[in-house]
Image (spheres, rainbow, N blue to C red):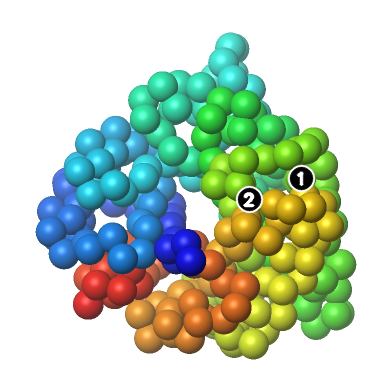
Amino acid sequence: MSHKLLIANWKMNHVDLDCVRFMEEFIPKFSAKREAWIAPQALHFNLVRSMGEMKGIRVGVQNVSENSFGAFTGETSAKSLRAMGGHFAIVGHSERRQFFGETSKICALKIRTCLREGLAAVYCVGETLAQREAKLTLAVISDQLLQGLNDIISPTVDKLIIAYEPVWAIGTGKTATPAQAQEVHAFIRSVLKERFPGLGEHIKILYGGSVKPDNVEELLSQKDIDGGLVGGASLKAQDFLALCGDK
Ligand code: PEP
């Protein structure tokens, strides 16, 4: 059985000293019984990577360009990130979709670039509250998955991760119940199995949306939940340790 994976999405939080303090507190107590990956601000990537590498903590970015290099002012290159020991990029986070106009079609290009450059892509999908109330959840997820994975033929299993993040549960304190999350994860699993026969059952599907120390165990005990993508509760070392099973 593969390890559960917890990914910290620090968003645009923490100055460099906060990152150092976090890692100094986190590293000695982290036992690696679960896998821990961290996505700090791109500015702090190398700092966090160098502090985390002794414990096998993988570090990545919260967004990446669909272009490998060239005249794209302000963008982050997957190629450069990989050359510096970066492991993954989050693609299609709902804040990118909402504030930066990122569509599933753009996500498809970004995922393809990540895989070409040797980065793992953590592809986020999720419905809004209005879509859930209109009973459109599975249709929305299916659409996001099929568009985002459109170009991908035969991914290496550990280079493609799906994060189910209901938009109404992100940063709101509202969590999908374990049963609600499992229902969507099972659906995602069925789409992945159909899309990638023989591989789909091994692709990790993470849940994200107000995961906290007091709800993580029940969420992770669900059959198709392979880990969590965590915002708020990943900012404090003690909380992230608890999510990683190290109280
Ligand atoms: C996220 O931003 O990916 C997230 C899940 O945030 P939070 O844990 O704060 O809901």
**Which residue lies at the image location 47% right of the left edge and 62% below the top edge?**
2
Respond yes or no on whether mark 1 lies under 8 Å from ligand 1: no
Q: Is residue 105 visible?
A: no
Q: Is residue 54 visible?
A: yes
Q: Judging from the image, what secondary structure is the residue with disc 1 in?
A: loop
CB under 8 Å between callouts 1 and 2?
A: yes
Question: In this rendering, is residue 175 above or below 148?
Answer: below
Name the residue nearer the viewer: 183 or 174.
Answer: 183
Q: On the image, numbered disc 2 is attached to which residue? A: 123
Give the amino acid type for the residue marked by disc 1 in the picture: Leu
Pinpoint residue 214: horizontal percent, then vertical percent.
38, 86
Pinpoint residue 15: horizontal percent, then vertical percent.
25, 46
Q: Earlier in the sequence, mark 1 or mark 2?
A: 2
Q: On the image, numbered disc 1 is attached to which residue? A: 149
In this view, the residue farthest toward the top is: 70
**Which residue lies at the image location 78% right of the left edge and 66% below the top edge?**
190
**Which residue lies at the image location 38% right of the left edge and 52% below the top edge?**
37
* Quarter placement of the C terminus: bottom left
Pinpoint residue 172: horizontal percent, then vertical percent.
52, 76
